[in-house]
Structures are given as structure tokens and as C-alpha cells.
Image (spheres, rainbow, N blue to C red):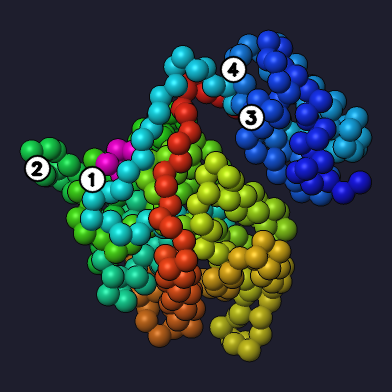
């Protein structure tokens, strides 16, 4: 039997939760299903936070899929506890003066997402657009270093009688990062709600002014910060970054699936493949596919998305980031031209999205003080 969402839902419809009159499917408790071959991951919302109840739901789901779908399936169940009495609705709205908000995402760390974000933002500025960037990688901020602003602190200004943060500016890009507020050697150890609150402060307590594009560099994964973002603001679209490696591609697929969930529905503008190949300076005609060849291209075709760029592995990219001067500023070097080409493809995808789709609406999900995942 081929595993798909319909088969899984039919299997789960055999489960009725305690004190519920309908099946787990009819109750609307199934929030997301992801299938990777014979691996299945479920997001299920429940109202009872007790460990005994969680374990029962998890075992019932595994048993139902094994009995009614595929007995050798590997199943992971994420239980989202939603205490109705304590729901806090986060109402999303537009940021005044900001025309487009683009999230740069990667479900896996270490693929160069922040490097892509920084060079994308600077490329936009070089093309004449008004640009801002938020370093929303709350746990591992790096944008302040990449823009040569390490050790700097934003000033406070008064706007319409309210105190706001004035973002710092570098290479024509307005920038705000949690790195401005934490010491360079200080570990940021926050629970999900604290990280979400920090992101909302970066969004709403900042005077961005008029921007054509606000780039949001997200942390790796698909967690609280991501949900807070799609609840807080209407994203124009998301760009997913991956390397060609199969492990990274599997995570990239999860990232795409998150944005395409019915309850989130953020347009995915396409996929950027970073570290596509290595070309030695002394052998400019040679390409070495260290992490695999055309992996993101295959994933983009599979998901019917655009491949926005194939960025090579070049030493100067790392050196430029460490020096606080994004490599796209090198102008006519091959890597700078490749990043500019990527930026233009993203702009084309944004234009197409804005012509053919209605503005994205902020997601109306409930955050709860008792919200947790198993």
C-alpha cells in the first residue's frame, strides 16, 4: 500500500479520544501530516496536558496506522496541548511602511541561510530598493557580525509619542538583531514563549520607516519562532535554503511543508541551493560536487517550486562574512554575480506571486501558556 495523507487519515479515523464524541479526525485534532517514504510525522492537538493522556493518544495513533495503513511504518507523534481557557490570540497586522516581508528559512542548521539572507538584502539595496533585515535567529544571531556592526547598540527614538528602537544601518540596509542586546560570548537560553516575545519586539518596537523589502532571517527548524512570525505579520513569501546533501534536502522538504500547511498557507517563492559545488581557484573549469549534485533542483521539481540559485562553495564568502562585509559587495567576481543572479530570480518570483495571489493573511492560531510538544 502506498502511504499518503488519505490513507493515514482513514487509519486515524478509527481513534476516538476519551471524553470526545467524534473521531480524532472529525474533531479536527490532526493539524499536520508529513510522509517521507515509510516515515510518518503527525502534529495532533489535544486539550488534556497529563502525561498519561499524551501517552495514550500517541500509542493509539501508532497502533491505528500499523493496523490499518502499514505495519512497518516509523511514526513520530507531536502532541500540541491547547488549554482552551488560557488561549491567547496573537492578532497579526501589517508593519506600517513595509511593502514586502520575505522570510529566509532552513529547517536544518549549517546550510548558510544567514549568509544567503545577508547577501540577498545587500543585493536588493544595491539594486536601489529600500531594505531592512531582522536577525530572527534568536538562539544564534550572526547578522550583526556579517554587517560589521559587532559591539554596536541601537538607539531609542520617539515616534508619535512612543519610544521605538532605531535600527542600525550598514551597506544601505537597516538591521536589527538580538545580537545587539546580548554579549558576544553569552548563550541565549530561552524557552519558546520568550523567543517569540523577543521576535515580536524586534518587529513591533522598531521604527522601520518606508521599506520595499523586509528580510527575516529565521532560525533553523520549524518551531515557536516560525509560528509567531506567521501569526504576527502577513509574509509575502518564504525562501527555503538547503545544500545538495540528502539529509539537508529532507529537512528542506519539511520546511516547505510547514509553510504550505493549510493552516499557515505562506507562498514558497522557491529553493536556493547553497554550497552547490567547489571550484579551485587554480582549476576554474573544474566543479567538484562535495555535498552531492543537483539535489535542490530535484527537490524543486518534485515540489513544483522554482530553483532560485545554485551558489558555489567559495572561501571568500566565509572570509567576507567574518570581515563584516557581505561578499556580494565584491561586484564583478563570479560569486558576487551568482548572488546577484539569485536575487533577481527571487524578485521575479515575488513579482509573479504579487500579480497572481492575494495578500497573505496572518495565521490565526492559538498560543497557550500550556502549549507544548512531545
Q: Which residue is mark 3?
A: 28
Q: Does residue 22 appear anywhere in the picture?
A: yes
In terms of image quadrants, where is residue 362? top left
Q: CA distance from mark 2 to mark 3?
A: 44 Å
Q: Which of the marked residues, 2 or 3, is nearer the chain's N terminus?
A: 3
Q: Which residue is mark 2?
A: 160
Residue 255, x across and y down, in percent: 59, 50
Badge 1, how many Cα within 10 Å: few under 14, some, many 20+? some
Query: Mark 1, mark 4: which one is toward the viewer?
Result: 4
The tag on residue 206 is 1
The tag on residue 47 is 4
Residues shaded magenta? 200-204
Callout 2: SS: loop
Question: Front-most of 50 and 351?
Answer: 351
Residue 169, x across and y down, in percent: 23, 59
Question: Front-most of 219 and 152?
Answer: 219
The answer to if 4 sits in the magenta stretch is no
Question: Front-most of 144 and 222?
Answer: 222
Q: CA distance from mark 4 to mark 2?
A: 42 Å
Image quarter of the C terminus: top right
Query: Mark 2, mark 1: which one is toward the viewer?
Result: 2
Q: Which of the marked residues, 1 or 4, is nearer the chain's N terminus?
A: 4
Q: Which of the marked residues, 4 or 2, is nearer the chain's N terminus?
A: 4
Badge 3, how many Cα within 10 Å: few under 14, some, many 20+? few
Q: Residue at x 24, y 40 (%)?
A: 205
Amino acid at each position: 500500500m502506498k502511504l499518503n495523507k488519505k490513507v493515514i487519515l482513514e487509519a486515524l479515523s478509527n481513534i476516538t479520544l476519551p471524553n470526545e464524541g467524534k473521531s480524532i479526525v472529525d474533531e479536527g485534532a490532526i493539524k499536520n501530516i508529513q510522509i517521507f517514504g515509510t516515515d510518518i510525522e503527525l502534529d495532533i492537538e489535544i486539550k488534556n496536558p497529563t502525561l498519561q493522556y499524551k501517552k495514550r493518544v500517541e500509542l493509539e495513533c501508532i497502533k491505528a496506522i500499523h493496523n490499518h495503513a502499514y505495519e512497518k511504518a516509523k511514526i513520530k507523534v507531536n502532541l500540541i496541548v491547547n488549554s482552551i481557557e488560557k488561549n491567547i490570540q496573537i492578532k497579526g497586522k501589517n508593519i506600517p511602511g513595509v511593502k514586502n516581508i520575505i522570510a529566509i528559512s532552513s529547517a536544518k542548521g549549517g546550510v548558510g541561510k544567514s549568509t544567503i539572507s545577508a547577501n540577498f538584502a545587500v543585493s536588493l539595496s544595491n539594486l536601489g530598493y529600500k531594505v531592512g533585515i531582522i536577525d530572527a535567529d534568536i538562539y544564534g544571531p550572526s547578522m550583526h557580525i556579517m554587517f560589521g556592526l559587532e559591539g554596536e547598540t541601537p538607539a531609542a527614538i520617539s515616534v508619535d509619542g512612543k519610544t521605538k528602537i532605531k535600527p542600525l544601518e550598514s551597506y544601505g540596509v537597516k538591521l536589527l538583531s538580538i545580537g545587539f542586546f546580548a554579549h558576544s560570548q553569552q548563550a541565549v537560553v530561552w524557552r519558546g514563549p520568550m523567543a517569540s516575545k523577543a521576535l515580536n519586539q524586534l518587529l513591533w518596537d522598531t521604527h522601520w520607516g518606508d521599506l520595499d523589502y523586509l528580510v527575516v532571517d529565521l532560525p533553523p527548524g520549524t518551531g515557536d519562532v516560525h509560528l509567531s512570525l506567521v501569526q504576527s505579520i502577513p509574509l509575502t513569501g518564504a525562501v527555503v535554503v538547503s545544500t545538495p546533501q540528502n539529509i539537508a534536502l529532507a529537512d528542506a522538504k519539511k520546511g516547505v511543508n510547514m509553510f504550505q500547511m493549510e493552516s499557515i498557507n505562506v507562498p514558497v517563492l522557491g529553493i536556493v541551493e547553497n554550497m552547490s559545488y567547489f571550484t579551485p581557484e587554480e582549476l576554474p573549469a573544474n566543479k567538484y560536487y562535495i555535498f552531492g549534485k543537483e539535489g535542490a533542483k530535484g527537490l524543486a521539481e518534485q515540489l513544483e517550486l522554482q530553483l532560485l540559485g545554485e551558489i558555489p562553495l567559495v572561501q571568500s564568502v566565509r572570509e567576507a562574512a567574518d570581515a563584516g562585509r557581505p561578499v556580494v559587495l565584491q561586484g564583478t567576481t563570479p560569486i558576487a554575480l551568482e548572488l546577484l543572479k539569485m536575487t533577481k530570480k527571487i524578485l521575479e518570483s515575488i513579482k509573479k506571486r504579487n500579480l497572481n495571489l492575494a495578500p497573505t493573511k496572518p495565521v490565526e492560531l492559538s498560543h497557550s501558556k500550556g502549549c507544548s510538544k512531545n
